[in-house]
Structure formats: structure tokens, C-alpha cells
């Protein structure tokens, strides 16, 4: 009885006004997130084309994708490789530079600002075009290689290199992750290092035992966000290589675009989008599952 | 060698490394700027950074755009698309963040979990039904597909960021406002919003940046050249010329990144601090 009373009093009248403030999001979530999410799953089991109403065809899209579509396995491989290169590449770069900059350096604010600049252009067409011309066969990068006595490379012409050259564009934009790491590094209490050095710990030991554990939440956050981004990459491949040469940069994002918005095969496109979603979910779940073993939180994060 | 000398040489090495990383990061942009004055012959096969002459020819030629549509129009389109989107995003996300951060209501835990889950909802998986939905409303080839998600706070990243910021503001502020007889809306508008300016500004800047750079959504939702934003216009120029005049292409690309760079230099504090604070509690 007492308990029940306490429960009724838990919310004040005023608290119910929260729903008024949440209203835009509640509508947005329902109509522009939840509904499309469920609908795309439904579409993926239909032969929906923009002009023809959807007919249920069971798993046909998926079986076609997995067994008959010669492009699919290649696209999947390219996407996985792209993610595997860019996400760790970008984060390691960001972490290394952040650790290097995390000391008393004069002009650190200016340095931080300048290093951030490439990150301003994530997904920018203009910068993709710039990348294309920098690495073209007779472009400036090859000219530089030649001046130091190295042979030219077919950055875009080689099926092996093209994807990596695109990945370099992504890794070049490590500045935003670096800024986050820098902020996190600053928050590690100085006393911990002092105590450790009194106990005779070396610099490398301190790095792995103090620095890294304290910034694991940021590493984790970055890892998840970057992975989600990487699996959906589209612009750089579409603008620079159009998926070539020989589909070696034909990422799933491009495959999705081509099927759904060039051929207007919405059903088939939806099946591809669910493959992308499943990939993202799988990796995210693995990361979350493993996080209790390596991500260190100081508070429980309740509010 | 004295201790001072050792310290000095350490400093020199340190700044040398910083400079090398800096060159690696900034050289492409600097090269891009100078390439806007170069002919194709100068661009290819040469490592020379500076052009033989500085002439605005490529800017003038490039600006004319395609057919009768110039970059003036493309810029107007871009700002017509981006600016309302930014303001709608900030306004709606701030309201929703207020609802989450300052009230205890039934179902809060579930709704907050949903919000965090949508943070990880990939655009790829909702884009097709969104397209058909907008198509049935007749919104394709208008900027409504950009405005409406912004109006409806479909940017969980910003909602989350603003919630985190608001959690740092003392709740006593609200309490004393209530005691003074303020309603929740007035408390929000008059007490909390002014204190949230830096966070709102950061959110606005990032939304500007992302919407300005975004190519995928524009490509899908906008299909007539007269409504093209810059990103689509650039791709069009790249594809439509049989022999690309790269100096001209670079000139227009440079013009396209210029607003972002200017904004960054004027507001870098908000960029860098905004990004630093959002990640911290995540």
C-alpha cells in the first residue's frame, strides 16, 4: 500500500509535459525511422519496383543475391576490406598523433586546429575530385615518387591499389578522432602517472596500464561510429573510381545505389540494405559484447 | 652534451615531426589552391607547387556553370537546402533534449534506449522506404526531404549531444525558475537556452558541415539541375566534359570548400570543443 502510494507520487504533473517536448522526435522516430526500417525489411521479401506494387516473393532476393549475383560477393569483400583498412587505420593514426601531441607544446591549439582541417571534408565531392587528380597516373604524387627515384604507381588503374588509395583519403581525415582522443588524454589524472612512476613503472608500461584503459570509452565510441560509417561508404568510390577498375572499389553502398536508384529495383535494393544492416549489427554486437572486457567506465552513466 | 642541449634537440625533433605531419595533412589543400591557376600541362607530370601565372580565368569560366545555370544558382540552392535544415535541426533537437534531460516520465528508460539505438541506425537501411514515402508525398526534387527530418529531430547524435550538455547544467536553475512561477517552456527558453549557446552552436556547425558535404541524399532526392546543390554540380561538371580542364575543375572545387574553411576559421573553438565534449561521456 505504502509502495503503491510512493509509485503514484513518482511523477509530478509537470513531468508529463515532457511528452510535449518529445513530440517532434516521437513523430519523427515513428514515421521516418521505425516505419522505413520495418518497410525495408518487408520490401526485401518482395519484387517491388518503383512503378510496380510489391509482390511477396519470399527469400528470392536473398537467394539471388547470395547464389546468382556475381557482383555481390565481390562487393561484400570490397566493403569488408575497406572497413578493415580505414577504421583501424584512422583510429591508430588519430591515437598515435594524439598521444604524441599530449604534452606541453607551445602552440598546441594552432596545431590541433590545422590538423583538424582535412576532417572538415568528410564525404565532400570537391575533395574526392582533388584526390582523383592527385593520384592520377601522371599526377603530382607520381611525379614526387619519380623525383626521389621511385617508379610511378597506378593508383587508380590497379585493382589492388585503387581501394587502398580511397582508404587513404579516409585515413587522411583522422583529425576529428584525434581531437576526441586529445580531450580524453587530458582528462587522465596526473596523479596516476606520478604514483606509477614512484612505483617504478616505465613509460611504455604506464601507457598501456594507465593511458589506454582511461581512454577506452572514446576508442569504443569511435570504433562503433566509424564502423557504421565505413560499411555504408559511397561517395568516394562513386565519384573517384565509379566502382572500378574491374569493380575493385564497388562497395555495397554503390551496389545498393545502383540497384535501387538506377534500376529502381527497390525490393532487391532493400535486400542489399539489410545485408549492410546485418553486417553493421554483427560487428557492433561483437564490439559491445567484448566491451565489458576492455572498456573501462568511471561512472555507471545513470541520470 | 649538457642537459639543456639535449632538451633543445628534443624540442627541435618534436617540432620537426609536428611539421612533417602538418605538411602531409595540409599539402593537398595548398596544392589544390595553386592548381586553380594551372593549365593541364602544368598540373600533370610536375611537382612544382606554384603556377606560372596567377589568373582568375578558371574561376570566371568555371563559375558560368552549365548551360544557363551558374554557380551563383548552385550556391543559392546549397544555402536554401542547408540553412533551414541547420536551424530546424538545432531547434527540434534542443526541445527533445530538454524533454529527456529535465523530466522524469514513464517510459523514459525505454525511449532513451530507443534514441541511443537510432544513433546506430544506418541511413542505408531506411533510405529506400524514405524515398518511396517522399515520392508519394510529391517531395522528390524539393528540399523537403532535408527539412522534414530536421524538423522532426531525426538526428539522434545532436539530441544526445545536447542531453549530455544539459545534464551538466545545475537542476537548481529550473527549480528556482519554477518557484518564481515560470512554466516549463519559459524555463527552457529563458533560463536554459542562453546557457546552452555553445552546445547549440556546435550542433549547428556540425549539421552545417554534414549537410553541406552530403552527396548521397542530394543525389537521390534532387534530380533537376536547376535545383542542384554544389556537390551535385561538381560531379556534373566532372562527368560532362570530354576533356576535363583540371584547373577549372579545381577552381570550382576550391570555391566549394571555401565556405566550410571560412566557417571553421571563424568558429574553430566550437568545432574542436564541440567534438571533444560529445565523445567524452559517450
Image (cartoon, grey):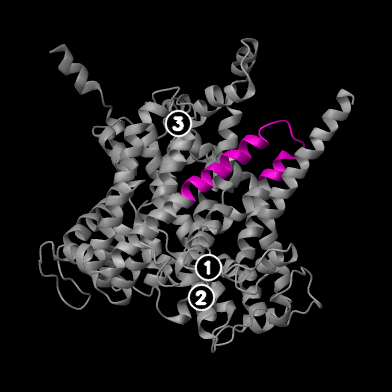
Asked if residue A36 lies in the magenta stretch, the reply is: no
Q: Residue at x 68, y 78 (%)?
A: B59
Q: Which residue is under mark 3?
A: B167
Q: Residue at x 71, y 63 (%)?
A: B30
Give the x, y percent position of residue A268.
22, 68
Quarter of the image that includes the N terminus of chain B: top right
Residue nearer the viewer, A47 or B58? A47
- The reply to whether the C-beta atoms of the residues labelled 2 and 1 are less than 8 Å apart is yes
Q: Which residue is under mark 2?
A: B235
Give the tally of numbered discs: 3
Q: Quadrant of residue B187?
A: top left
Q: Return the disc, 3 or 2, that comes first in the chain's sequence.
A: 3
Nearest-to-viewer mark from 3 and 2? 2
Q: Which residue is under mark 1?
A: A125
- The chain carrying label 2 is B
- The chain carrying label 3 is B
User: What's the distance in space between the residues labelled 2 and 1, CA to CA?
Assistant: 7 Å
**Region of the chain picked out in magenta, as a range:** A86-112
Amino acid at each position: 500500500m505504502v509502495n503503491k502510494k510512493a509509485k503514484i507520487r513518482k511523477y509530478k504533473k509537470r513531468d508529463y509535459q515532457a511528452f510535449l517536448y518529445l513530440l517532434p522526435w516521437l513523430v519523427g522516430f515513428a514515421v521516418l525511422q521505425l516505419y522505413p526500417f520495418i518497410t525495408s525489411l518487408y520490401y526485401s521479401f518482395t519484387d517491388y519496383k518503383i512503378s510496380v506494387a510489391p509482390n511477396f516473393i519470399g527469400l528470392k532476393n536473398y537467394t539471388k543475391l547470395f547464389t546468382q549475383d556475381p557482383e555481390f560477393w565481390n562487393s561484400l569483400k570490397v566493403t569488408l576490406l575497406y572497413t578493415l583498412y580505414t577504421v583501424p587505420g584512422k583510429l591508430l593514426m588519430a591515437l598515435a598523433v594524439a598521444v604524441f601531441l599530449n604534452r606541453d607544446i607551445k602552440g598546441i591549439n594552432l596545431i590541433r586546429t590545422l590538423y583538424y582541417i582535412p576532417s572538415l571534408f568528410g564525404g565532400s565531392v570537391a575533395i574526392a575530385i582533388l584526390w582523383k587528380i592527385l593520384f592520377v597516373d601522371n599526377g603530382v604524387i607520381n611525379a614526387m615518387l619519380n623525383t626521389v627515384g621511385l617508379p610511378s604507381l597506378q593508383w587508380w588503374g590497379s585493382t589492388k591499389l585503387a581501394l587502398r588509395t580511397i582508404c587513404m583519403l579516409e585515413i587522411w581525415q583522422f583529425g576529428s578522432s584525434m581531437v576526441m582522443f586529445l580531450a580524453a588524454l587530458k582528462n587522465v589524472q596526473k596523479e596516476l602517472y606520478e604514483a606509477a612512476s614512484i612505483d617504478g613503472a616505465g613509460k611504455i608500461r604506464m601507457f598501456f596500464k594507465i593511458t589506454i584503459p582511461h581512454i577506452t570509452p572514446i576508442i569504443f565510441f569511435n570504433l562503433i561510429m566509424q564502423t557504421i560509417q565505413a560499411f555504408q561508404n559511397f561517395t568516394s568510390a562513386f565519384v573517384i573510381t565509379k566502382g572500378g577498375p574491374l569493380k575493385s572499389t564497388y562497395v555495397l553502398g554503390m551496389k545498393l545505389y545502383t540497384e535501387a536508384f538506377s534500376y529502381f529495383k527497390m525490393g532487391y535494393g532493400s535486400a542489399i540494405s539489410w545485408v549492410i544492416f546485418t553486417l553493421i549489427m554483427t560487428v557492433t554486437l561483437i564490439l559491445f559484447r567484448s566491451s565489458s572486457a576492455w572498456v573501462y567506465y568511471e561512472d555507471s552513466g545513470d541520470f | 652534451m649538457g642537459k639543456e642541449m639535449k632538451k633543445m634537440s628534443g624540442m627541435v625533433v618534436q617540432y620537426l615531426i609536428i611539421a612533417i605531419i602538418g605538411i602531409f595533412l595540409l599539402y593537398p589543400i595548398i596544392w589544390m589552391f595553386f592548381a586553380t591557376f594551372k593549365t593541364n600541362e602544368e598540373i600533370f607530370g610536375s611537382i612544382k607547387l606554384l603556377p606560372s601565372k596567377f589568373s582568375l580565368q578558371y574561376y570566371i569560366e568555371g563559375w558560368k556553370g552549365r548551360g544557363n545555370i551558374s554557380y551563383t544558382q548552385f550556391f543559392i540552392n546549397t544555402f536554401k537546402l542547408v540553412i533551414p535544415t541547420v536551424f530546424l535541426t538545432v531547434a527540434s533537437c534542443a526541445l527533445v533534449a530538454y524533454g529527456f534531460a529535465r523530466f522524469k516520465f514513464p517510459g523514459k528508460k525505454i525511449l532513451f534506449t530507443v534514441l541511443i539505438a537510432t544513433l546506430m541506425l544506418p541511413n542505408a537501411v531506411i533510405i529506400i522506404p524514405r524515398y518511396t514515402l517522399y515520392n508519394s508525398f510529391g517531395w522528390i526534387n524539393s528540399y523537403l526531404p532535408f527539412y522534414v527530418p530536421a524538423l522532426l529531430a531525426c538526428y539522434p547524435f545532436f539530441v544526445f549531444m545536447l542531453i549530455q550538455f544539459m545534464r551538466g547544467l545545475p537542476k537548481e536553475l529550473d527549480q528556482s525558475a519554477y518557484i518564481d512561477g515560470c512554466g516549463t517552456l519559459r524555463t527552457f527558453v529563458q533560463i536554459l537556452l542562453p546557457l546552452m549557446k555553445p552546445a547549440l552552436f556546435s550542433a549547428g556547425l556540425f549539421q552545417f558541415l554534414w549537410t553541406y558535404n552530403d552527396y548521397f541524399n542530394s543525389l537521390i532526392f534532387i534530380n533537376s539541375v536547376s535545383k542542384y546543390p554544389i556537390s551535385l554540380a561538381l560531379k556534373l561538371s566532372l562527368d560532362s566534359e570530354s576533356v576535363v580542364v583540371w584547373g577549372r575543375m579545381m577552381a570550382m572545387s576550391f570555391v566549394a570548400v571555401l565556405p566550410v574553411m571560412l566557417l571553421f576559421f571563424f568558429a574553430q573553438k566550437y568545432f574542436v570543443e564541440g567534438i571533444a565534449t560529445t565523445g567524452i561521456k559517450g
